[in-house]
Image (tube, helix red, strand yellow):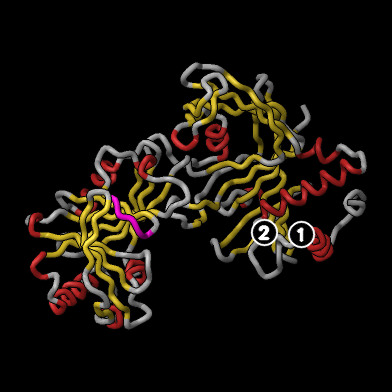
Amino acid sequence: MCALSVPGACVSPQKLKKCIDKCTSQFPYNKQCDAHELLIFLIDRLHDEAIRRGVEEINKLFYGAFTSRIQCMNCHSVSITNEPFMCISLPIDGNTEELPLILQTEANQLYYFLVKFGEETTVKEIKGEAKRSLAVEDVDMYLLVDGKELEEVFDSLLMSQAMSSGKSWRLYAIEKSKNETNQTLIRLDIGKPNSPLFLKYPKELIEKEDEFREALTTLIANSQVSKKDKSIQHSFSLTKGIVHITQKGLSYLHVELKPLSRNSHFSNILKRIPCKPIRLLHRAEDYESLEECLKGFTTAERLKGGDQTRCERCCREVEASKKVDYLQLPQVLVIHLKRFKVRCNKVRIKISRFISFPMNLKLEKADGGVERYGLYGVINHMGGIERGHYTAFCKSAAWTQFNDSKVSPLDEDRVVTDNAYILFYEKINS
């Protein structure tokens, strides 16, 4: 704190890291740590230290306040709350979700899709897109919950209603057979649990192991897996008897197979299938600019389902509308682009989409006043979930790039990239 208060002073990153390690073990060496979490930690500690010394500068520099207006959709009563913030964390995906969809044709060909959908997307719309993509007449849709429970899902169901937090999901679509009455739904587990595959198979051939093995070999061979990978095609055997399962009115046969090769899991097979994207976004289009992200952040949203709030007048959980505005804006505005998220199937991903952002930014407050800001810093993240690299751009008289120990000039037209993670704006005095 004392070193930072000296004008023009420099602080060694190694010394700063040692100070941080004395306070917390949250940011270990040799592990990818999140720059946003580190920034919040540093500002919070600086704020606490400044308050202890009777200094208000950190509070004036970094802290603003939101005002939140919640209106009950039942009795229309309104509650208003104010809360401080030191960073605005913005979703950049328009409140969309992504879910893997495995589609299997009557000829046992496998296709792997990544379905992106919004709150109003129905099962019928996903089925329609899948049928159009593969030119099949009709499919049955199934949802596998936490790798265990299989549910049949119907056309009118909203995908947002079908899923709840804290569980993993995988969507299956199986082409309807021309001779559907003679077909039995079979769940196949090969070695690794929670990564099954489903197929429909003639009832009279199920207990004939040779024919069954041949059918599975055909299934894998037709799944666009490299034909050179012979270890996958003949590397499993039946281990237990065929078990008949009925749950939630859905009846199917469960077959467990023993892998004779470490590459025999269906999850490994699916990795070899080219992914086809399906976009079903409705009103939840992905954002393309910082201005769109900020507009979405302050747009009224409907709180429903698991997001319902308690109304003191109605004395129960109710649907409500929520609107957030800026009550007070700080001298230094920190904006965090939420590039890391957990999908509804529990998989953590990075969103590498390009989001444009301006050199000069205007924000309107709740009272109608306008604050103007100029960009002076960017933290960039390259890489993915498991490993990555941070760089920084900073403007004083001109833009400069900081990449580990390398410092170099930077042209302004190279500041805006798809690696931008945290943006720093400073208030422009009028």
Q: Is residue 2 above or below residue 71?
A: below
**Relative to 100, 236 lies left or right:** left
Q: Is residue 365 above or below residue 47?
A: above
Amino acid of disc 2: Thr
At 70% from the left edge and 28% from the top edge, which residue is drawn? Answer: 371
Q: Return the x and y of residue 322 as percentages of the image width and height.
A: 54, 27
Q: Return the x and y of residue 69 as percentages of the image width and height.
A: 59, 24
Residue 398 versus residue 61: which sits nearer the camera? Answer: 61
* Within-10-Å neighbours for mark 2: few <14, some 14–19, many 20+: some
User: In the rendered image, which residue does mark 1 sit on?
Assistant: 24
Q: Earlier in the sequence, mark 1 or mark 2?
A: 1
Q: Residue 391: which numbered mark, if any?
A: 2
At 65% from the left edge and 57% from the top edge, which residue is drawn? Answer: 34
Q: Which contiguous range is marked in magenta?
A: 147-151
Does 191 lie within the magenta span? no
**Count of numbered circles in the view:** 2
Quadrant assignment, res 17:
bottom right
Residue 354 versus residue 166: which sits nearer the camera? Answer: 166
Per the image, label 2 sits on a secondary structure element best described as: strand
